[in-house]
Amino acid sequence: MASRNQELFERSQRRIPGGVNSPVRAFKAVGGTPVFCKRGQGPRFWDADDKPYIDYVGSWGPLILGHAHPEVVAAVQEAAARGLSFGAPTEQELEIAELLCELVPSMEQVRLVSSGTEATMSAIRLARGFTGRSRIVKFEGCYHGHADSLLVKAGSGALTFGQPSSAGIPPEAAAHTLVLEYNNAEALEQTFAQGGRDIAAVIVEPVAGNMNLILPRPDFLKVLRDLCSAHGSVLIFDEVMTGFRVGLGGAQAYFGITPDLTTLGKVIGGGMPVGAFGGRRDIMQCIAPLGPVYQAGTLSGNPVAVAAGLATLRLVQAPGFYDRLAASTRQLTEGLAVAARTAGTPFSAQAIGGMFGLYFRASPPQSYAEVMECDKEAFNLFFHAMLEEGVYFAPSAFEAGFVSAAHGPDELAATVAAANRVLARGRR
Ligand code: KE4
């Protein structure tokens, strides 16, 4: 008998392209039918067939407190009862702006938007307006949302300009984007030596979480910072994923590197649509209505979404919150690595704060090329076998995973026990 997930997926494909509102949800990378989520509570959600799953996606990062945290839900209900939106300033968006600038000291001013894409698109436009330059640099394998100038893949030559990585993007929209190899400090130095004065901005995921998890090499971010400073280019840390995920001050605090602009999303909305971009006051002063760089949004700073964000940001400031979260994440990755070693499966894993990478490869990759060496088929078999066991990992070998404060010892132990069963069967 067809499961309710299958029925819903067949129906949804009639009215929604691919049956989903964001491509990665369609299970194209892993095959099979996506599970439809019916309700969530803490570390779990239940699908349309009422099957429970321990959830390591957490809406792709926002749910650092787990599903339906009572204090977040209460804050949303209370805000909604006072009005869903005003399109006018509210005290709550001022509160979250002040809190973000307090917790992320490099942000002297901040502008709220409704998604990570809006945040990065606006930050790029702002950097271009501030510098009067057009050229930007991004890194292969890093994802910054779907703005035209950022959906760009490496050009034919190592230092040639990008080509659109999506249909519908005019070549000229990609022509100003240079795509370099993540963690390659030498290519960075060469690029700036050749034309640093023409570079408006470099945008980087300080910990890459969109080509599975790749940690920055020790010198990479420092070289990036020094080169941008020397050439008057704006360094943008895209912390939509790492912000309040790898630690309270994000990756910039973790690695001690101060960007000029930071983009945020996910955790700062606690599961509701909130993004933000902010940084140096002299740069932020260029944004309308103060300056010539236009940016706007009907629901920017929406009071109900901000209420969820404020409740979340208050709770993550609890003493020891990130130490406990990092310890849980390490317990998961170490347990999975032991299970794989026992089964003789080429596998590695690593964690930073509340995010992790799983690799069917003997050691954690340090570059996009090394990520491509991971055994994708092995991951897909593992993914589906764990799904049967009631464990939900990201439905792609090229995504990071997330642990929440709601994942307790029982969930972590159950996950590792399931992995032992799955890997021991040889049916990864
Ligand atoms: P959104 O527009 O999806 O809110 O944010 C875009 C974005 C920007 N920057 C970084 C570093 C991001 O990771 C993202 C979005 N992340 C993906 C996860 N790989 C969202 C999942 C999806 O696309 O459905």
Image: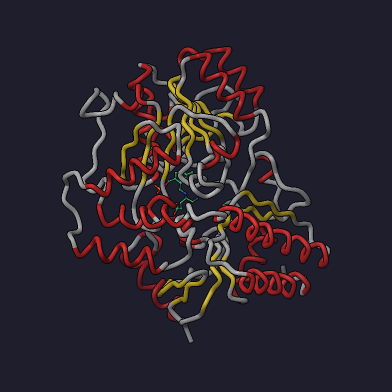
Q: Residue most toward the bottom? A: 1
Expressed as whole percent of the image width and height from the top left, the position of residue 89 reads 19, 44
Of 257 and 172, which appears nearest the observer? 257
Q: Residue at x 65, y 57 (%)?
A: 327
Q: Residue at x 61, y 72 (%)?
A: 411
Name which quarter of the figure residue 12 lies in.
bottom left
Q: How is the image coloured?
A: secondary structure
Expressed as whole percent of the image width and height from the top left, the position of residue 44 reads 51, 72
Of 295 and 146, which appears nearest the observer? 295
Q: Residue at x 64, y 68 (%)?
A: 412
Expressed as whole percent of the image width and height from the top left, the position of residue 301 reads 27, 47
Expressed as whole percent of the image width and height from the top left, the position of residue 88 reads 16, 45
Compared across the picture, whether 298 is left or right of 58 comes to left
* Number of marks in picture: 0
Q: Residue most toward the front? A: 319
Name which quarter of the figure residue 341 lies in.
bottom right
For the C terminus, the quadrant is bottom right
Compared across the picture, whether 226 is left or right of 129 comes to right
Of 276 and 293, which appears nearest the observer? 276
2 is higher (above) or lower (below) than 425? below
